[in-house]
Amino acid sequence: MSDGDEERDDEGRSPENGRDAVPDATPGTPAARDESGEGNEDDVNPADTEQFEEFREDLDAVERRIAGEIDPGVRAMVVAGAVFALLVSLVLPHAGGARGFDVLLGSEVATAEHIGLPSRIFVWFVLIFGIGFSLLALMTRRWVLAWIAVAGSAIASAFGVFSIWHRQTPGLNNYVGAGPGIGLIVGTLAIMVLTFHWVKVVWSRTALQLAAEEQRRIAAARDEERARRERFGED
């Protein structure tokens, strides 16, 4: 066989050998991505883990802060209106010529009107809880302050109703004084409205707060399990 025939035979066999050869997986091809991606789900980058742990305390602090806050929403306007009504009630007459501030300070006018203990307790609870803690809770949005406000407002509501009843009841030696004034009535109604809306606010927990609490519980359980495995040398 001549040299020309051998060259033609080699050329004829080269395409078959090319088809039989397995192509190399170059970077960027699907085959390379499949091979390089094996085991990525099980492998965790230590650098990413350390970076996450650096911000773990900050994230936990943010979650705790969110969980301890309230979101009154539209009720904030109602609460603010009720607080304003309580302030107005202190300058209006509570009984005869005795205004709310007279009852609060125990002035001579309040003594002349025979203001009893229920009315005095009522105005002090209105000032401290209905006005003071309600404003603090609105400004800081702290859940604890809102709880204190609702507890004090509830007690003030009971004393307000009792004060109205007390002004309509004859005293010693059948003394009949002035009946409940407009300030006492307005204050009682305002503190009852305030109590109702504060109860709605403190018991309404948003989905974000519940989700944050659930995530903290899951993370704590996971950390406890990891610490247990490291302590006993488990994989």
Image (cartoon, helix red, strand yellow):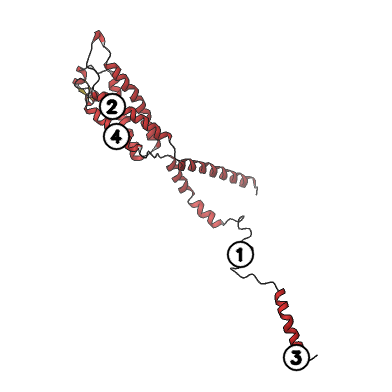
> Marks 3 and 4: in contact by CB < 8 Å?
no
Q: Amino acid at mark 3?
A: Gly
Which of the labelled discs sits on residue 33, or is there none?
1
Sequence-wise, the earlier of marks 1 and 2 is 1
Helix, strand or loop status at disc 1: helix
Query: Could you give the CA–CA distance between mark 4 and mark 2, rounded to whole angstroms?
Result: 12 Å
| Distance between the alpha carbons at the discs numbered 1 and 2 | 74 Å
Residue farthest toward the right in the current orientation of the protein: 1
Q: Which residue does the numbered mark 4 point to in the structure image?
A: 81
> Could you say which disc has been placed on residue 46 in the image?
none
Above or below 44: residue 75? above
Mark 3 crowdedness (10 Å alpha carbons): few <14, some 14-19, many ≥20: few
- Res 91 seen here: yes
Dot 4 or dot 2: first in sequence order is 4
Which one is closest to the eye, mark 1 or mark 3? 3
Percent from the top left, x then y, of residue 28? Answer: 58, 68
Q: Is residue 210 above or below residue 160?
A: below
Q: Gap in Å between the C-alphas at discs 2 and 3?
A: 117 Å
**Gap in angstroms between the C-alphas marked 4 and 3:** 107 Å
Q: Which residue is mark 3?
A: 4
Any mark on residue 187, and which?
2
